[in-house]
Image: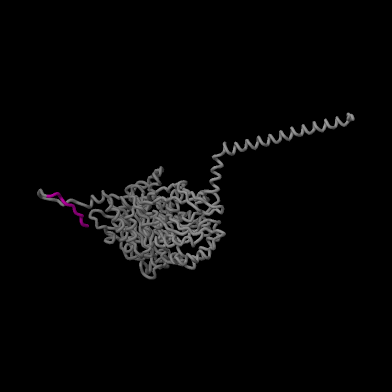
Amino acid sequence: MSRSPLLLDEVNERQGLFARRTVLFGGLAGAGLLALGGRLVQLQLLEADKYAVLSEHNEFDFQLTPPPRGLILDRHGVVLASNRPDFRLLLAKDESVDVDRVLASLSELMPIDDGRMRRLRAEIEAAPRRQPIAVVEDMSWEEFSRVNVRAPELPGVTADMGEVRVYPFSAAFAHVVGYVAKVSAKDITKTGPNSEPILLNPGFRIGKQGIEKSYDLQLRGKPGARKVEVDVKGRVVRKDPQGDIPSVPGSPIRLTLDADIQNRALEVFGADSGAAVMMDCRSGEVLCLFSAPSFDANAFVRGVSGPDYRALAEYERKPLFNKALTATYPPGSTFKTMVALAALERGVDPSRSYTCHKHWFWGGRSWGCDKAHGTLDLKGAIAQSCDIYFYQLALSIGPDPIARVARFFGLGQKHDIGIPGQKVGLVPDTAYKRRAFPRDPVWHPGETPSMGIGQGYVSVNALQLCIQAARLANGRVALEPRLVQSVGDVAQVSTVQPPELPFAQDHLAFIREAMTAVVTSGTAAHVADLGLGPIRMAGKTGTAQSHNYGAGSHGSHGAQGAWDQRDHAWFIAFAPYDDPRYAMSVLVEHGGFGADAAAPKAAQIMKVALLKDPQVRARIVQPIPTSAPGPAPQTRLKSA
């Protein structure tokens, strides 16, 4: 039977369609296999190293490790801040860890008080998952070993060894060196160096005060990393020391301070409150920057309890306050050197005399003095610190010339030495009165006598008065103080040449001679004697009212009455008087008279600097003369 031509055509058409589809799908399948093969080649051959690293990261993790913080040294290399090993316990929060049970178990092994327990629970609750929190720090070796033995019973707890900051001369340097402490929430920023993950490390500390704060970034260094093997939940199961990345230690910072002088200031002040600042009056280097009373900076590294901090903060002598920089006081009679220089520059004859009868009546009121000095010229008025002389001298020249001179000597100015929080104080003039008192903008004559004796609106800090003394001693340039000698290997030298002092040399010499008379025959005679033979000191005492006695009369002042009602005692000085090398200021807060409280302290501190200076010491040590040949000559200290 023959097929119909129509049926054969239909069969042929279906076969052709099948063939075309076979070719099409075969081509698509081939292209897919080709793409898959190419991708396999790319993954397994071309990018094998990359994915090997990624695969390894699924098994290994890197934990940041804090770098050793840079040392802080004095000018001779004496260590003021260093690091020591710290045994500690870390607890990482995890869903499998019963925090309360673990803390209860730890409290059986070592004392953890209720307050510390509450703070720990809050810290652990706020911490990210698996972020370790330091539960106990600064453990003894016995405590460290005891916990290590019980480690299997304490899930999530790791016994670890890190480093902790230590201050060998904490009390002497607490205010200037400062301290480090744990990172708080307000320390962390979204950008910049304080956004780095290392800040969350339980062993990391940042500077909170003084040099530690100002040079925190330089002291930090760069963190390293510890390679560890982790399980699927990110918990550490094994360490891999071969893969550790070493950290880079922070840069050491060398200060211009002298540890011997600073420690002597601590001894001299004892329980008194105040400050002592010393500068090299040739270079501006700060040798001493001390504030009393002080505190233990090491306690702040570990963390001060609430009651202990309140005790420090509420103590009337304010140990947390840097009285050398952040406290200002009336300068009292130390300011008379500025009034005298202003008068000389205005053409006042130094032989001009005024008579002091202990009281001077002017402007409808009585202005007082410590005693009846009789008739004095300018040099005698400085040596005897006669208030009545300077009331009248200040009135004769006015406030503006006095303010101009005082500012040239660093008063009322900010001097950047690398420590934050400095208060600039105030040197008033008629422009200040217009700015500060718009309702009464006129400078009244009755405001000038108080300015003439360093009272009234005038306020300074101890650093500024030291600068005043240093510039008077130098006599030629407006020295600026320098506290940081070097950071790492880079010397911190100012490229700005200090300006010259625009005052006549004979006027400056007159002020120095008058300051020498203060110590030899004036208010500080006998109390500021160095006992170093030909080496003597020049200075100026000051007694500054801490409150108003009324009617311009001194009344009963000095060291009488309750401590917080007594006057502040000042003394500024330089030595040797005939070849000035060191200048200083000493403040004894509520110490009474400057001659009684401040001058003796200045002499004892100054003595250390002079005896450490080889050239000064050579003037003190004299050979014993011999009349006949014999053994080699001995040396002796010349008597005062």
Q: Which quadrant is the N terminus positioned in?
A: top right
Give the number of callouts: 0
Residue 83: where, in percent of width, then height? Answer: 40, 54
Specify whether residue 344 is in view. Answer: no
Q: Is residue 155 left or right of residue 630?
A: right
* Residue beneath the point at 18% across and 52% down: 635
Point out the residue furthest to the bottom here: 561
Specify whether residue 167 is in view. Answer: yes
Against 226, is 363 above or below? below
Our reading of the magenta stretch's main secondary structure is loop
What segment is highlighted magenta in the picture? 631-640
Point out the residue furthest to the front here: 1
* Residue beneath the point at 44% across and 61% down: 149
Against 137, is 37 above or below? above
Q: Nearer the viewer, residue 27 or 181?
A: 27
Q: Which quadrant is the C terminus positioned in?
A: bottom left
Residue 244: where, in percent of width, then height? Answer: 46, 47
Q: Is residue 338 magenta?
A: no
Colouring: one colour
Residue 282: where, in percent of width, then height? Answer: 33, 47
Q: Nearer the viewer, residue 60 or 488?
A: 60
Residue 20: where, in percent of width, then height? Answer: 77, 32
